[in-house]
Structure formats: structure tokens, C-alpha cells
Amino acid sequence: MRVRLLEATENPEELICRGARNDYMEEWVADQSFEDAMAGVEGEDVEAQKANFLAKLLKRGHYGPFEHPSATFAIEGVSRSCMAQLTRHRHASFDVQSMRYVAFDEVDPADVEDGEMVVTPPSATDPDWIGRNQEGGTVDDETVEEREAVFQKSVKRSVEDYQELLDLGMPPEDARFVLPIGTEVNMVMSMNARMLMHVADLRAAADSQWEIRNMTEEVLDLAKEWCPITFDYYEQNMKNRKNRLAP
Ligand SMILES: Cc1cc2nc3c(=O)[nH]c(=O)nc-3n(C[C@H](O)[C@H](O)[C@H](O)COP(=O)(O)OP(=O)(O)OC[C@H]3O[C@@H](n4cnc5c(N)ncnc54)[C@H](O)[C@@H]3O)c2cc1C
């Protein structure tokens, strides 16, 4: 899996502050310099004022201004299962790689066994892996070897059958019915800063599945570069407190 920031609102934290300061001033915010708009906020310079003000908004639960800046991420190689989880979030926008226009006809089924085209869950190869709902704990090496063999056989067979159906003239959007839910997909995803924190509340949590959790952590790392004060505050004070942003 790879995640990259494609585009994002410039000066996102200035925008959040401007939006929120609008609520408390008589003047029209568009006529004000950023320094003027922040006048009266505690802090020795405008950077300190920005940090104090953003923290105050988050602490109070004044989340609306965080809806102004948004970011677009390109995500490569997550499973269709992960995609189904992610696209349940209704205040985000998505583009999803099509299985009608992109046919996996060039993929060698032998490479699928080695991890191409289908995401391999860690529980198929790691005897110490404990999933969220797994009743037993770790397993012995022999069992995990069996798991891996069954998994590899199954995904290879699916891709062989898929390609055979394509060869028999079946449209890719119909032939795909035999492919596993672990089949990789590329996506483009846009959301505002408030939604990003909400998604992180649910998907970076310990009870969320490893794949979407890893993806969300990567998105959060990029968000910290884009909107540093906000996402540092989120990390320090809000992360792992479920649903704070959607009470
Ligand atoms: C660990 C985990 C396990 C899950 N298991 C399942 C499962 O087994 N089956 C399943 O179907 N789903 C499952 N889900 C998905 C979950 O039920 C939500 O659909 C998904 O997380 C979207 O989040 P959300 O409800 O906060 O909505 P979002 O779309 O992210 O919306 C954000 C917030 O906006 C508000 N909102 C949005 N739309 C509405 C609306 N129509 N009415 C009222 N308020 C609204 C809510 O406050 C909501 O929290 C699971 C999620 C997690 C994190």
C-alpha cells in the first residue's frame, strides 16, 4: 500500500482561524489581514496566536471551522475489503479504479501466489498475529504454513479462472465476480480536516482492521505535514477517544 497527498488547501490553518474569527468580529473578515483578524488572541506572535486559537477550538469542540480546508490523497494497492470500509464515510469523496476498464489480463497467476494483485493478510503468514476477533491466540508454524498454502492456492485459482473467463469473451465487469475481496484497488480520496479526524477516530482505533488502520496512520502522517498544529493536537489530546468529532 502507498498513500500520497495529491492536493490540499494552501494555508489550511490560517483558513480555519479566519473562518472562526469571523464569528467573533464586527468587521468583515475578507477586509482584514491575518494579523488583524487574530488581534486579541493570546500569544506573543501570530504563530503562537494561531496555535493557541486552534487548540482552543478543538478543546471546546468547535469543529465547524475545520471543515473549510480539505485534502486529496492517492491510495495505491488496498484491498476491495478496505475500500468497502472506507467508502462508508459519507462526507468524503472518492474515485475508485474501475474493474470494467482495468482488466487484470496481464497478471501472471504465479505472481499472485507471491503477493501480486491480491493483498495478503498478516494472519496468513505470521503465526504470532492476533486479529481483533480471533478467538484463539497465536498458532504454530505448521498451521500458519497451511494457511498460507490454502490462501495462495485460492487466490491463484481465482485469477486463473478470471483470465479464462476473459479469454472466453466474458466482459471484465462480469468476470470479476470470481475475484477475491482482497483484490487490490487504487483510489483517490478527498475530505476536509474535520472529517479526517472523524475517520481517524474510527479507523485508527485498535478495534479497526489492520489494513484500514495502517492506511489511516499513513493519511494522518501526511495530514500532520499539511496541517501540523491541528493534527499534532489531535494526536496528543484526541486520538483514540472514539467519536469525539461526531457526538
Ligand atoms: C470497528 C468497526 C466495525 C464496523 N462494522 C460494521 C459492520 O459489521 N457492518 C456495517 O454495516 N458497518 C460496520 N461499520 C461501519 C459503521 O457502521 C459506519 O457506517 C462507518 O464507520 C461510517 O461512519 P459514521 O457512521 O460515523 O458515518 P460517516 O459517514 O463517517 O459520517 C460522519 C458523521 O455524520 C453523521 N451522519 C452522517 N450521515 C448521517 C445520517 N444519515 N444520519 C444521521 N447522522 C449522520 C454521524 O454523526 C456520523 O458519525 C464498522 C465500523 C467500524 C469502525
Image: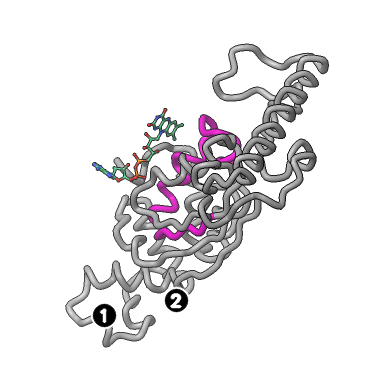
The x and y percentages for residue 131 are: 61, 24
- Name the residue located 57 percent from the left edge and 47 percent from the top edge: 169
Question: Is residue 21 left or right of 92 when viewed as pictured?
Answer: left
Residue 214 seen in this snapshot = no
The x and y percentages for residue 174 are: 50, 42
The residue labelled by disc 2 is 46
Question: Is residue 63 left or right of 101 when viewed as pictured?
Answer: left
- SS category of the residue bearing label 1: helix
Q: Which residue is more in the foreground, 33 or 172?
A: 172
- Name the residue located 69 percent from the left edge and 37 percent from the top edge: 160
The x and y percentages for residue 4 are: 60, 61
Name the disc covering residue 38, or none.
none
Which mark is nearer the camera, 1 or 2?
1
- Ligand 1 has an atom within 8 Å of the beta carbon of the residue at disc 1: no
Q: Which residue is more in the foreground, 27 or 209?
A: 209
Q: Quadrant of residue 128?
A: top right
The x and y percentages for residue 183 are: 60, 41
Mark 2: amino acid? Val
Residue 114 seen in this snapshot = yes
The residue labelled by disc 1 is 29
**Looking at the figure, which quarter contains the C terminus?**
top left
In the rendered structure, which segment of residues is drawn in magenta?
187-213
Q: Is residue 196 above or below residue 39?
A: above
Magenta region includes residue 188:
yes
- Name the residue located 82 percent from the left edge and 18 percent from the top edge: 141
- Name the residue located 53 percent from the left edge and 55 percent from the top edge: 97
Q: CA distance from mark 1 to mark 2?
A: 16 Å
